[in-house]
Image: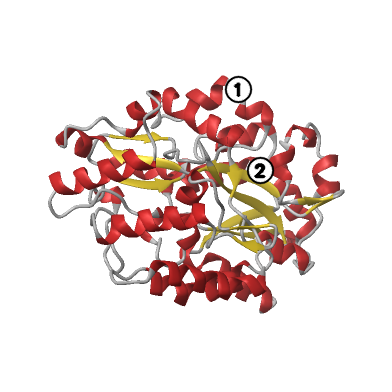
């Protein structure tokens, strides 16, 4: 009997050791710490585990402001994650350095995947010829988030109502931001994206108004900051910060999500933060300008690193995560690049926090918008811009000279 029990125990130990050895732990970096986002992602991982019981997926949150830098350090140090969310501005650098696995064969071979369902414009950053460096899971336009209570207190129509009347433009934006600041002492009319418009989100601060005026920050290997359209947009922002005092200034924290700013720019994924906002709120299109309506799209893709030890199974998880069913699940937070999901009523009606009217504006912005400019030297461009942008954001700045300095700094890199 004792010998039999000993044999059973030995067999159990062998089984445990074998299972442990065979188990694969995939590490995926993300820049969200949202409980709602992570719950959804873990649900997708569990559904993958149902078919691959020996695979565990761990989501590792890296703060958004340090995300690309820390990802770069991990790769350079020979310890890349198996899978990563990658921002659109960083994609070209990783692609051109041949660091990313070609996902095409895995995706196209996955049962029922329907690779052709992905919008071709949305794939522009992630595909070269037949090589697929990544697959977009979020093609998310920048939208205006607004505090309706602050608008009501100021006796102002909110951006959604103004947009419906065709009156939501850059002039009106400046006008209401100033009035909101005046009627809400100690608070601001507007805050740049994530409160980082003077640092890690500097291009996100500049791009929407510059596009509204008909310009761009750069295109065709040429700096756009010193073009007349961009200069006009930047001067308006500078006036709002230092003359109107309606935009949260450098060194201050406005925090729209805590009710300290009436408006901000962000993407639909941030709606998850509004469940406990404590005030009535809404989402509206970006204001138009002399250049017309110019929606700006931020994009993120899923990539697998070619030097990873688990790249084959990692690619299969990417295929699972971006199949039609899971893209539809993620669409409540991350607007899809799959045409079938974007065009479905479920997308318009699928976000419990955002009304169908507002979601229609999100869908329209995806259909009509342009992606944030990307560049293989994006980190170097931002580093070169930083001191010149710092010189711009001073009350007594020579704005024209500061703008010329930005172009002088980045043109050699473009």
Secondary element at tag 2: helix
**Residue bearing mark 2:** 321
Q: Is residue 1 visible?
A: no
Residue 413's label in the rendered image is none
Q: Is residue 164 above or below residue 2?
A: above
**Would you say the residues marked 1 and 2 are in contact, meaning their CB atoms lie under 8 Å apart?**
no
Q: Nearer the viewer, residue 259 or 303?
A: 259
What is the distance, in whole Å, between disc 1 and disc 2 at their CAs?
19 Å
Q: Is residue 180 visible?
A: yes
Q: Is residue 136 above or below residue 235?
A: above
Q: Position of residue 122 (x, y in %)?
A: 68, 42
Q: Position of residue 249 (x, y in %)?
A: 28, 63
Q: Earlier in the sequence, mark 1 or mark 2?
A: 2
Residue at image position (44%, 71%) is 402
Q: Position of residue 196 (x, y in %)?
A: 40, 62
Residue 344's label in the rendered image is 1
Q: Nearer the viewer, residue 102 or 11?
A: 102
């Amino acid at each position: 009997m004792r010998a039999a029990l000993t044999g059973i125990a030995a067999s159990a130990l062998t089984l445990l050791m074998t299972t442990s050895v065979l188990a694969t732990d995939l590490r995926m970096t993300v820049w969200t710490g949202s409980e709602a986002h992570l719950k959804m992602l873990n649900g997708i991982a569990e559904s993958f585990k149902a078919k691959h019981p020996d695979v565990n997926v761990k989501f590792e949150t890296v703060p958004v402001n340090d995300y690309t830098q820390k990802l770069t350090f991990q790769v350079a140090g020979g310890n890349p994650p198996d899978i990563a969310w990658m921002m659109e501005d960083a994609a070209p650098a990783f692609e051109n350095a041949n660091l990313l696995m070609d996902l095409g064969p895995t995706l196209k071979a996955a049962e029922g995947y329907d690779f052709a369902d992905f919008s071709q414009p949305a794939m522009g950053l992630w595909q070269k010829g037949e090589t697929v460096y990544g697959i977009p899971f979020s093609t998310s336009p920048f939208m205006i988030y607004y505090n309706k209570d602050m608008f009501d207190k100021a006796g102002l129509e909110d951006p959604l109502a103004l947009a419906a009347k065709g009156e939501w433009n850059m002039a009106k934006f400046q006008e209401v931001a100033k009035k909101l600041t005046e009627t809400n002492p100690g608070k601001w009319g507007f805050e740049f994206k994530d409160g980082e418009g003077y640092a890690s989100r500097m291009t996100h601060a500049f791009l929407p108004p510059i596009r509204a005026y008909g310009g761009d920050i750069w295109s065709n290997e040429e700096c756009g900051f010193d073009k007349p359209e961009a200069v006009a947009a930047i001067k308006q922002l500078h006036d709002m910060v230092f003359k109107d005092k309606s935009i949260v200034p450098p060194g201050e924290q406005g925090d729209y999500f805590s009710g300290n700013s009436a408006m901000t720019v962000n993407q639909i994924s941030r709606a998850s933060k509004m469940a406990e906002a404590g005030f009535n709120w809404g989402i509206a299109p970006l204001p138009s300008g002399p250049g017309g309506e110019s929606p700006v799209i931020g994009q993120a893709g899923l990539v697998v690193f070619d030097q990873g030890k688990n790249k084959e199974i990692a690619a299969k998880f990417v295929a699972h995560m971006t199949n039609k069913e899971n893209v539809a699940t993620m669409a409540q937070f991350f607007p899809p690049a799959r045409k079938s999901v974007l065009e479905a009523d479920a997308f318009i009606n699928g976000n419990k926090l955002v009304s169908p009217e507002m979601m229609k504006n999100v869908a329209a912005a995806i259909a009509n918008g342009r992606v944030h400019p990307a560049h293989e030297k994006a980190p170097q461009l931002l580093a070169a811009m930083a001191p010149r942008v710092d010189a711009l954001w001073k009350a007594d700045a020579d704005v024209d000279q500061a703008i010329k300095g930005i172009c002088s700094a980045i043109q050699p890199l473009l």
